[in-house]
Image: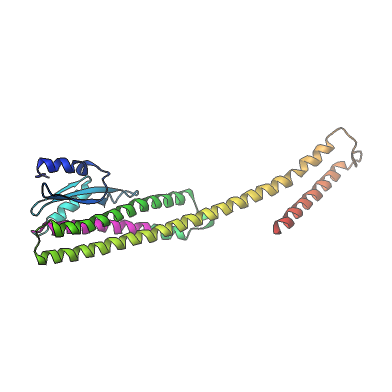
Amino acid sequence: MTLSINISCQKKFKNYILDRHEQPRSAYDDLSDFGVLVVRAMGSIAESHATTVPIFLGFSDKVLISVCHDTDQATLVKKQSALGSSQISNHILAILMAILTPYFDKLDDISQRAEKLEGVHGRGISNQNLDNLAMMKTNLVYLRSATAGNLIAIQELQGTFHEKLKLTAALSKSADQQISDLLIEYKQCQTMFDVVGDVVSETESAFGNILNNKLNQTMQFLTVWSLILAIPPIVSGFYGMNVKLPFAENDAAWFYTLVITLLLVVWMFLHIRFNRRH
């Protein structure tokens, strides 16, 4: 791609062009009579981790310059820039609409995965499910932030079209209508991300409650059996000492120790069970 901007404009917007972490924004340089729009687009769809990359659009009445940091976005921008329109505003709006489509695709993917996890309960909760939930939650944070930033940048772009570009009344009205449609779509996308984010958060909370309950049950089980199994060593330990104890001189002393142990175990079990009900 050829950057046909004057030197002062290049210096002014150099950071916008080179920074992969640049946030969405819209600005206009009156000195060079050149506008700039930075929006965040979805990275590679094949990746499970959702990433967004900036797309730089520099424009005037007759020039449109695009700088992409990802081959998928470069292909998308090139395709939209090949439309049969002579108006720079139409190309920009077509690019903005095309950028939105992968967001909805990713939203549908996350929504379907969240619905599957909603039906998982009890023993079905695995480390993989928890990892998927954590990844979805992280993805939603990045995607919601990107769509919110794009929304603000597009609103600022509308003012630039009105004040800086030389558009006829008909073209200005058409651009306003397209931007209004864009804003509606981006707001809808943002709202859907919020809804899916709430679903993921509630699912994560439910998983946490279930796991905590399972942990409590496991601890109760271990506590009960540790108390019960502590009785036999106590009884056998007493009768293993060189002291005079009841039934110690009897030939059936070993049987009496078993009976005493069994009685104490039954008593402990019933005592714990009765107290747990209260």
Residue at 34% x, 50% y: name it.
142
Towards the viewer: 258 or 233:
233
The vertical placement of 165 against 74, above or below, is below
- Tell which residue pokes out farthest to the top in this image: 242
Towards the viewer: 232 or 29:
29
Residue 196 position within the rendered picture, expressed as x and y whole percent measured from the top left: 39, 59
Left or right: 37 in relation to 115: left
Residue at 8% x, 64% y: name it.
168
Q: Check if residue 205 falls in the magenta segment.
A: no
Q: How many marks?
A: 0
Residue 91 position within the rendered picture, expressed as x and y whole percent measured from the top left: 14, 57
Is residue 217 something that shows in the picture?
A: yes
Give the quarter of the figure containing the N terminus.
Answer: top left
The vertical placement of 107 against 58, above or below, is below
Which residues are drawn in magenta?
86-110
Towards the viewer: 109 or 10:
10
Left or right: 120 in relation to 160: right
Q: Check if residue 93 falls in the magenta segment.
A: yes
Residue at 44% x, 56% y: name it.
201
Corner quadrant of residue 92: bottom left
Q: Name the magenta segment's main secondary structure.
A: helix
Give the quarter of the figure containing the C terminus.
Answer: bottom right
Is residue 98 something that shows in the picture?
A: no
Colour basis = rainbow
Residue at 77% x, 40% y: name it.
233
Residue 205 position within the rendered picture, expressed as x and y whole percent measured from the top left: 49, 55
Left or right: 72 in relation to 212: left
Residue 58 position within the rendered picture, expressed as x and y whole percent measured from the top left: 15, 49
